[in-house]
Image (cartoon, rainbow, N blue to C red):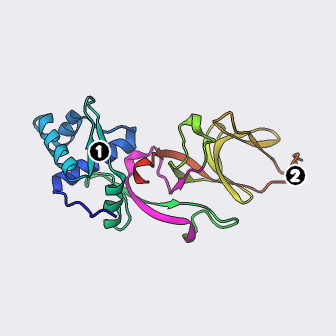
Amino acid sequence: MPETPKLTDRQQQILDLVQSAIERTGAPPTRAEIANELGFKSANAAEEHLQALARKGVIELVGGTSRGIRLKSDTLRALNESRGRQFSLPLPSLAQLTLPLVGRVAAGAPILALEHIEQSYLMEASMFPRRPDYLLKVRGMSMRDAGIMDGDLLAVQKAKEAKNGQIVVARLGDEVTVKRFRRTKTSIELLPENPDFKTIVVPLPGQRGEGGEVEFELEGLAVGLIRNHMLM
């Protein structure tokens, strides 16, 4: 485990800003965007602070692109653990949420049961169009074409009802799955966004399906997505 790098207040603020931009958009900010956000007179001032962060091993700078900033996962993990295993994204002035991360879910147990919580993440509320209640670690590639990849963190708002077309978290017997929701006159269909996977059909009460009755429960609605590559 690497030692936690010692950052100045300004360096920490820039690191938080880079993290926040990546989580919002999937890409780091430009030097000009950093300068504008933090009130620097020029992009050169932002570059100087980025170079200092690179010397401390927190980031890598990639030449030839205005967004050539990479976060180092080992250093981020050390920073997160030094903060009590909370991942701090926002600037201090922004509203924050503490969201539990749900890993594997035991059969029949509530999704937010204590034994399912791997850690907590501190995030700014404005990242999400609706307030999430928890994060779910995505497993598998059935929603690949919707941009939801294995290992991503899906922000979920607890809900017991969904509209056709919404991406939902559903419990099917002993399994929790992420799919697109569609209700018909006779069934609930959970549609993948990857042609390698089949649609799951859950007969409505009173309807007979080929596989017999399947225990189904809607756990929540997807309200945001966080790419988890820099936390691994």
Report if residue 133 lies within the magenta region: yes
Disc ID at residue 89: none
The quadrant where residue 210 appears: top right
Residue 134 in the image, given as x and y percentages of width and height: 51, 57
Viewer-proximal residue, 225 or 8? 8
Residue 77 in the image, given as x and y percentages of width and height: 36, 59
- Dot in front, 1 or 2: 1
The residue identified by callout 2 is: 212
The magenta stretch is: 115-139
Disc 1 to disc 2: CB gap under 8 Å: no
Q: Count residues near mark 2 (Cα–Cα under 10 Å), then give few for <14, some for 14-19, many for 20+.
A: few
The residue identified by callout 1 is: 18
The quadrant where residue 82 appears: bottom left
Residue 224 in the image, given as x and y percentages of width and height: 48, 45
Residue at 69%, 56% in the rendered image: 175
Q: What's the residue type where badge 1 is placed?
A: Val
Q: What's the residue type where badge 2 is placed?
A: Gly
197 relative to 157, above or below:
above
Residue at 56%, 36% in the rendered image: 146
Which residue is the extreme one toward the left?
41
Judged left or right of residue 188, residue 145 is: left
Secondary element under disc 1, as helix, strand or loop, is helix
165 relative to 224, above or below:
above
The quadrant where residue 145 appears: top right
Alpha-carbon span between mark 1 and mark 2: 50 Å
